[in-house]
Amino acid sequence: MAGCDTVCFDRAEHFEKMSYRNRYYIPGANGLITLSIPLINGRNQRAVMRDIKIFNRDRWQVQHWRTLVSVYRRSPYFEHYEHSLQQLFQTEYTFLTDFNLAGIHWLKENLRVTFNETFAEEYQEQYDESFTELRNIKPGYQKSPATSSPQYVQMFSERNGFLPDMSILDLLFSEGPRVKFTHPQ
């Protein structure tokens, strides 16, 4: 998204289980950690994204925040971003799209990237070639564009090696203000 002029968020697409829509990955001392946002009606949703509700009784935000602190408290830049990110995890969101969008806004500000935002309110199965389609990327099924990105020093890399496709938080906490994005050529 950082290399785009405009990003269209499709709130009319159907929720897809086992996707990045409600989960993210970080490296842990013993390998990959999956952090998943619990949903009302579970993962077998038959609804459009704008209607997907978060199951907040699980106190998932407390668990996610504690995990982030545990993994990243010794990373080079975690304390620089800690206070503002914690606010995101202290705000209760009803809809998954609201949490995701709040997270994207936090990232835009902290990564110092800009792009215009548009929202699709009606489902469109295919977009023309001028769009880069990212709705179908799923963990473990096909490589994301981030896989070809340069490697950096991750937490626990001495145990795990480099783990691709981690949350952008991993890059931000490891590299801080050195993270630079450019438009693709």
Image (spheres, helix red, strand yellow):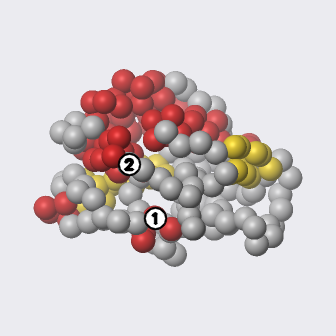
Q: Determine the residue positioned at 32% across, 42% down.
A: 176
* Residue situated in front as seen by the camera: 47 or 160: 160
Q: Amino acid at mark 2?
A: Val
Which three-letter amino acid code belongs to the residue tagged 1? Ala
Is 133 situated left or right of 146 in this image? Answer: right
Q: Position of residue 53 (x, y in %)?
A: 65, 39
What x and y, as percent, mark residue 60?
A: 44, 37
Q: Secondary structure at mark 1?
A: helix
41 vs 125: above or below = above
Describe residue 3's horizontal placement relative to residue 95 as left or right. Answer: left
Task: Name the residue at 46% across, 64% down.
Answer: 146
Residue, far right = 122
Q: Mark 2 sits on what residue? A: 179
| Residue farthest to the bottom, as pictured | 142
Query: Mark 2, mark 1: which one is toward the viewer?
Result: 2
User: The C terminus appears in which quarter of the rendering?
Assistant: bottom right
Q: Residue at x 71, y 43 (%)?
A: 117
Is the residue under label 1 in contact with that under label 2 (CB below 8 Å)?
no
Tell me the CA gap for discs 2 and 1. 14 Å
State the mark number for residue 146.
1
Residue 40, horizontal then vertical, whole percent: 62, 42
Name the residue nearer the viewer: 171 or 92: 171
